[in-house]
Image: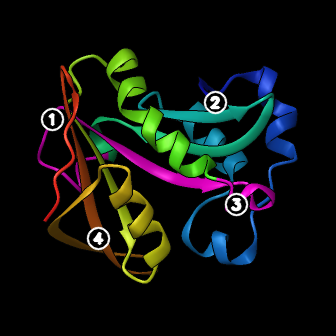
């Protein structure tokens, strides 16, 4: 699996990316996210490709985007994380999340934390994030669709450390 910044060569892959109704309750359509990324220089649309297939999509958002969730000026927000509904249950989301810390360190120098907000009711996603090194440090926010759990993955120069409560 490889992570790529979105550019126009991936336009067809985005057109064929599928999300089901349940997924759309918790996340946004990649084409809408890309439009926002094109309008906001602090948003980066990221594609996880497996053998030339787009299987997972997400956005990394710096500065203003992360401020509602973290006081750390060196953090980046992971948002709109999804896996194409036809590829769910195959381990692609986990694979993408395991590649993420190194990708962030290589492409966003000085960043020492990845932050995300997950809906309290989305227990499957919470479990996945925990398995991939994200920690629930007890921070909560209200979102448009209910209470959000704020989770963090702390990055260190030697890799990232998993913390188990």
Q: CA distance from mark 2 to mark 3?
A: 15 Å
In the rendered image, which quarter contains the C terminus? Answer: bottom left
Span of residues in magenta = 66-90
Q: Earlier in the sequence, mark 4 or mark 1?
A: 1
Instruction: Quadrant for residue 2, please give it.
Output: top right
Q: Residue at x 33, y 60 (%)?
A: 130
Of circles 4 and 2, which is in front? 2
Q: Is residue 133 left or right of residue 137?
A: right
Of circles 1 and 2, which is in front? 2
Q: Which residue is mark 4?
A: 149
Instruction: Quadrant for residue 156, please give it.
Output: top left
The label number, if any, that marks residue 1 in the structure image? 2
On whether residue 157 falls in the magenta region, the answer is no
Q: What secondary structure is found at the residue carrying circle 2?
A: loop
The label number, if any, that marks residue 73 in the structure image? 1
On whether residue 76 falls in the magenta region, the answer is yes
Rendered position, 60 above or below 3: below
Q: CA distance from mark 4 to mark 1?
A: 20 Å
């Amino acid at each position: 699996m490889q992570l790529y910044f979105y550019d126009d060569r991936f336009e067809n892959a985005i057109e064929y990316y599928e999300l089901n109704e349940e997924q759309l309750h918790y996340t946004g359509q990649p084409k809408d996210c890309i439009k926002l990324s094109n309008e906001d220089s602090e948003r980066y649309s990221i594609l996880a490709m497996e053998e030339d297939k787009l299987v997972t999509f997400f956005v990394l958002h710096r500065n203003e985007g992360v401020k509602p969730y973290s006081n750390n000026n060196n953090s980046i927000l992971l948002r709109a994380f999804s896996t194409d509904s036809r590829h769910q249950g195959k381990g692609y989301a986990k694979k993408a999340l395991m590649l993420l810390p190194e990708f962030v360190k290589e492409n966003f120098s000085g960043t020492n934390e990845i932050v995300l907000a997950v809906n309290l009711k989305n227990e499957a996603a919470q479990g996945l994030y925990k398995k991939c090194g994200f920690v629930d440090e007890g921070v909560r926010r209200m979102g448009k669709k209910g209470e959000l759990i704020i989770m963090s993955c702390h990055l260190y120069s030697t890799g990232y450390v998993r913390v188990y409560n």
